[in-house]
């Protein structure tokens, strides 16, 4: 999926760790069954290394993950979502001034009020109905 250029500031979206911290990060991913491919090449939709580093440093942006009531999956703070994430929002550290915002507990909407993502809708339904501004699939 291409980055959502109108919504994001240009940057490198993946935190680089020292070899020791990379080893510790991979152990954390394995031990906690974090849904993240540590061998992914290139940019990912979530800066999980940045999130892990934030947890280690006590960064308040790295709040603990939780079960999302809308889709029953583990979710991590929006702060570390990259523009490649299907629910990239204004809460990301890389969000530009026009990034979509959470309109309620399940929908992302543009500043004009257009819903571009809905966690409660079946995957891709908004796009099929012509209601989404971008692809919803990862």
Image (cartoon, rainbow, N blue to C red):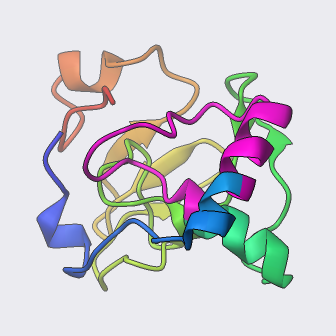
Q: Position of residue 69 (x, y in %)?
A: 80, 31
Q: In x, y percent, where is residue 39?
A: 43, 37
Q: Report if residue 129 is visible in the image.
A: no
Identify which residue, 62 or 25, lies in the foreground.
25
Name the quadrant containing residue 75.
top right
Image coordinates of residue 78 in percent, x first then y, are 58, 61
**Where 118 sits versus 53, above or below?**
above
Q: Is residue 103 above or below residue 56?
A: above
Vertical placement of residue 113 versus 130, above or below: below
Q: Is residue 31 magenta?
A: yes
Judging depth in this view, the residue of 5 and 126 nearest the camera is 5
Q: Is residue 22 above or below residue 93?
A: above
Q: Which residues are magenta?
A: 24-49
Which one is nearer the viewer's eye here, 76 or 20?
20
* Location of the N terminus (image quadrant): top left
Q: Is residue 29 magenta?
A: yes
Asked whether residue 131 is in view, the answer is yes
Q: Main secondary structure of the magenta part?
A: loop
The quadrant holding residue 20 is: bottom right
Residue closer to the observer: 112 or 91:
91
Residue 118, horizontal then vertical, whole percent: 48, 35
């Amino acid at each position: 999926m291409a980055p959502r250029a109108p919504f994001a500031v240009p940057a490198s979206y993946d935190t680089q760790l020292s070899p020791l911290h990379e080893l510790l990060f991979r152990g954390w991913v394995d031990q906690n069954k974090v849904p993240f491919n540590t061998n992914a090449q290139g940019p990912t939709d979530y800066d999980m290394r940045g999130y892990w580093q934030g947890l280690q440093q006590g960064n308040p942006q790295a709040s603990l993950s939780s079960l999302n009531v809308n889709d029953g999956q583990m979710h991590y703070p929006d702060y570390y979502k990259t523009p490649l994430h299907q629910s990239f929002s204004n809460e990301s550290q890389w969000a530009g001034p026009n990034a979509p915002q959470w309109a309620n507990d399940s929908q992302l909407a543009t500043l004009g009020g257009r819903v571009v993502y809905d966690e409660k809708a079946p995957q891709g339904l908004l796009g099929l109905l012509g209601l989404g501004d971008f692809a919803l699939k990862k």
